[in-house]
Image (cartoon, rainbow, N blue to C red):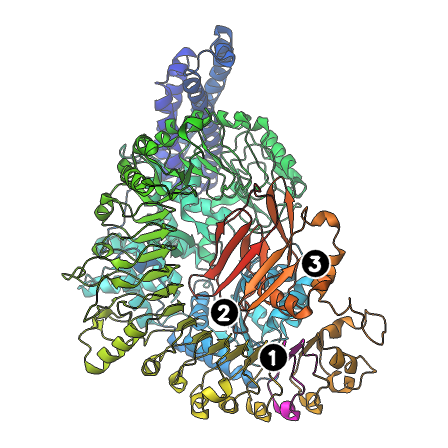
Amino acid sequence: MAEGALFDVANGIIGKSGNLALQEIVLIWSLKDEIAKLGETVSTIKAVLLDAEAKQHNSEVSEAIKLWLKRLKDAMCDADDLLDEISTEALRREVMTRDKKAKEVRIFFSKSNQLAYGLRMGHKVKEMRERFDAIAADRNKFRLEECSGERQVRYKTREQTYSHVHAEAVIGREDDKKAIIRSLLDANYAKENVSVLPIVGIGGLGKTAVAKLVFNDEEIKNYFELKLWVCVSDNFDVKIIVEKIIECIKNKKPKDLEMNTLVNDLQKEINGKRYLLVLDDMWNEDLEKWLRLKDILMGGARGSGILLTTRIKIVAEIAQTMQPHLLKGLDETQSWSLFKKMAFVEGEEPKSASFENIGKEILKKCGGVPLAIRTIGGLLSLQKSEREWLSFKNNELLNISGKDDDILPTLKLSYNHLPSHLKQCFAFCSIFPKDYEIEKASLIYMWMAQGFIKLYNEKKCPQDIGDEYFMDLLQRLFFQEVEEDELGNISKFKIHDLMHDLAIQVTGSDYTSINSKENVIDEKTRHVSFGDTLYSSSEIPISLYRARRIKTFLLPCQPKYDTIKSNDSTFSEIIASFKFIRLLDLHKIGIKTIPSSIKKLKHLRYLDLSMNEDIEMFLNSIVKLYSLQTLKLSKCENLKELPKDIYKLINLRFLEIDGCSGLTHMPNGLGQLTNLQTLSRFVISKGSIDSMPKSSGGLKELAKLNELRDNLSIENLKHGKDAVLEYKDANLKEKHRLDRLDLNWVCEATDETGAGYDDMLLIEALQPHINLKALSLEQYGGVIFPHWLVSLTNLVQFKLHSCNKCQYLPPLDQFPSLKIIVLDELDCLEHISDSESDNSDSLFYPSLEKLQIWECPNLKGWWRGRRDSLPSFPRLSNLEIRNSPQLTSFPLFPYLESLSLEKCSLKQSLERMMINNKTSSGNLPSIASSSSSPSTIVAPLSKLSYMWIQETEEALPEECLPNLISLRTLHLDKCPLPQGMRYLTALQHLNVWNSEVVDISNDWDEMEWQGLTTLLTLHFNELPKLVSLPMGLQYVSSLQNLSIWNCDNLIAIPEGICKLISLQSLQICDCPNLESLPEEIGALPSLQTLEFWYCPKLESLPEGIGALTSLQTLQIGGCPILLKRCKKQIGEDWHKISHIPNLKGDLSRQEEQPDEEEPNEEAKEPALVQLSNSLPESKLAKGNITRRIESDNHAVGISSLYRNIPVKMILIFLKLFSLWIVEVKEKELKATSVEPLLDGRHGLCIHGWEIETRKLSILTSFNLQLEGCLILKHVDSGTKIHFNAFDALTGWKQEALCLIEVPASAKWKFRRQ
């Protein structure tokens, strides 16, 4: 129990006693008097609790009071469990009363059973009351004063929203930032490739904040090829740190790999690249451990840097290669500026000089530490008078003790001022690891499970009050770094390390984090979490089973991707050992079956079984968890149905079933759960209404669930007028708390006459409440949209998918809050707006930030008819249009930051923006500047930083290019080259792909290349006219990475390449006619990585290779003649490469192969092909499996006869996807990845049809960051699948068509990530 929280616990016991005294079952058991007396005794003790807790630290009898409080705490915890047990029995009686025919009910209500149970509980209550009587009697020894209640202080609502509190308003650190950046950039001239710069300072000074300022600085972004952030914290385990770095690069946690494999993987990613790695919060003082890690990281390019933050100087001395940056406290002026910001609403600063002087005296105790200043300033913002500030200075501030550099006592002042209910809630957060990203909703569910949330208003539900608690703690700065979802709701947050230390301090031994099975757990411990992955019950310390009063079992560190073997035994052991448990988290531990003994956990309120993919069904015993509030089953993919008697879970409030793709229907009786607030999906049984099984609940189950909130997806809606009455029964209009509604119709033919009209009738019956913020319709078969849509004036997001008959859209310009519009696969849509003029009384789509239009083949324009003037989107920052070839008329988009176009042209809009810009800025609306409140006019497209252009017939208008002053990434795929490239002075990444007509050697003159002064990466792919590199390339002295793929007619690399003094990586792949390299290649002073793949005519390496002193890695594959000349010790070119530390590809395998004059045909095949040939037959699908990957003009067929396929064809496939083998089992297609792609390169890895990022650079060499936004779309027509993998932020996309000869009845599994 948290320090100072007894008052709140006492309130809880008094409240439960009062409620139970009125219960019928208590009267039957003759417990009313005993329970009432128990409540009275606790009330007597509560009256002196506040004084006792205050005197335990500073009175003559403090030790005796501490012992008394400890006795009281133990008694209160036991009493809470006892009263909870009685409450559960009352719930059980309530449920059983509904089913009087059941044998179990007759036994329960039998006279003998009631008498025996009543006697037993009566003895327990009496013993508990006598225990409290003894404790109450002892209170008189301490002369404690009575206090009626806590001082209730709440934050005054400020004019600004909460964002001003959690945003990083870093004051006084600009000079520190500049100095650190200067040191990192000067590191290019250091002796070692990788320099280490520590930032040293006491806790709370803002070391992490300063590191973030540096990490996100534009100059740093441009200088470093890779930027990585790892929080190290207390446990300096080299393997864990390596895993974290790899996870940071690949956006995926590595599987349970050996250390050697991890090191090899990491070095493949960082060697030869200029990277910045931040190691935040280092505590390691062991030199050997540091040297082990440092040795792994030394392969980076010259100029790489490691920035570490630490509180300990010896940590810095061990690691540093540069003088540490010592972070000091803020000076008096900076401190006062920050203090005023926290303590006063702007414009309400104190006018009195004496008031200000008191504030400055208090400020001295903060020692210039920003965290302390923020915390104390926030605390004093509650106390508005000079008298209150003076009292704080003269009393509480004087009680602070500790070392000069110990800030915890100062922070604890803020904790002491929390009301007791918030103390419990904050202290509970100690159970999470440091730097952990906590889900806000889950935390509130956990608080509810522990009984921390008290209902002070009958009109409010526990979740609303929990939200108030959260906001209170956020405003008091106990929480920070909040993250919002697309609708602006807080979804995640973090706790500062020092605040985490404070939480641990105030919880004592009640809360424990287990990091090893050797941990010794105190018998009084009540809340445990595991600081690492729990794989089996064998990793649970034996001593934990002796802590019989465990209430929380939490697994915050389970992996997202690793598969964990069956752990049913773990579940059973926990059930047997912890009968008082209230919060049980067993997500992702490999459970297959739920033991029937789970019904014994009568106190359980929170159960997380999510991501246990092998669970198929529940035994009905789970419905005996009558107190259960939260049931998490997300991503239990094989779960087929929910418990049939789920209606018995009368306290269930939160049911999470998103990602349960195997669910076929909702159970009958679900609608009786009227407390339900979260129901992420409602799956309607497929087939006609008459054919639905009796156990299946229709949409009428939603009728009374009017407390539903957040997100609801209704799936398998049917086409046809028969369903109208059922849809009305859903009563969506009364669900005023829903934020998001997804309506998904079943995929079936709707071509018959009148089907579209029926769908229009149906959707009218699904009218939601006007508070709805997000609406998505998928497979809707209507021609027009429902009348109620225009009433949704609060819409923030609107999505349409595969509404193939849709001809008209609603008047979207009438939704003033709309930020996101997605239109996908609308075959019949010709115009977005059917009106002649859009809403002219206000700005054109005033809030729209993101617009995506995909696969709308007949879309001609935004408006019907021609317009003389085109309005501008005032806030649109992300525009993506794909496969809409007829689109011409379109509004202007001057403020874009990201633009992706495929098979469409917006030339008219682009040219119009340039004309408007030249003649007048009057046609462009102003937008709010990020740095100031007044509106600002900016040049059209001057904010654009990312552009992807694919399959367009016309080049970008030249007059646009001078405006693209912020463009950093440009991808040109199957389209003409624009003129005016010299104006792209900020361009860093350029891709030119897949064009029969582009002649890059002649299309751009030298002037164009000379303007690309910031270009870092350049990638040429599938350019048949590329015979030699353009001469102008020699002027791009900033270039660091050059990749050339699939250029069949490339014969030679020109001598001018030697002038690329910054070039660090050169990769040439599948250029079959490349014959030689220039001797001058030895003049590349920065070259660190050199790769040649499948260049069969490349016969030798130039002597200049030996002069490349910076070269760290050479990879050769598929170059048989060259490989023979480079054979170790005996090859003619061996002396040229023997100095290179890392020889990869075929060079690394030559020692393992027996000497042969010529490799045989099988050896010439890629490693993956050989691997697939050696797979046992059981791994292949029954029948002939054929996959066909179509990309551009190439196609590859892969079957069991791989060796008949030309090597080049296999390679094209490998460049796009990793090879996977399919298995048809139980009519279900599964996929297993085989990796890697090619030695040194990665691609995509398919896991159960979920596409995951394998590294930052996918299919290109310019570090395109996908950031986990890949989505998988599919169209399934029996045996043919077409899917698109794309990234919504960057526009990266790859298409594939898979033909798989399996039974047409096979069940396909898809997951959207």
Residue type highlighted by circle 1: Asp
Residue at 43%, 59% in the rendered image: 407
Marks 3 and 1, the one that precedes in the sequence: 3
Q: Nearer the viewer, mark 1 or mark 2?
A: 1
Q: Does the magenta-highlighted stretch encompass residue 1093?
A: yes
The one nearer the camera, 253 or 148, is: 253
The one nearer the camera, 536 or 359, is: 536
Residue at image mark 2: 1264
Tell me where residue 95 sits by quadrant.
top left
Range shown magenta: 1070-1097
* Residue 894 screen position, x and y as percent: 28, 72
Residue at image mark 1: 1048
Marks 3 and 2, the one that precedes in the sequence: 3
User: Does 1107 sit above or below residue 628?
Assistant: below
Residue 824 horizontal side relative to residue 501, left or right: left
* Residue 794 screen position, x and y as percent: 25, 50
User: Does 976 sit above or below residue 679?
Assistant: below
Residue at 40%, 22% in the rendered image: 38
Question: Callout 2 environment at 10 Å: few (<14), some (14 to 19), or many (20+)?
Answer: some
- The majority secondary structure of the magenta stretch comes to loop
Residue at image mark 3: 258
Q: Nearer the viewer, mark 3 or mark 1?
A: 1
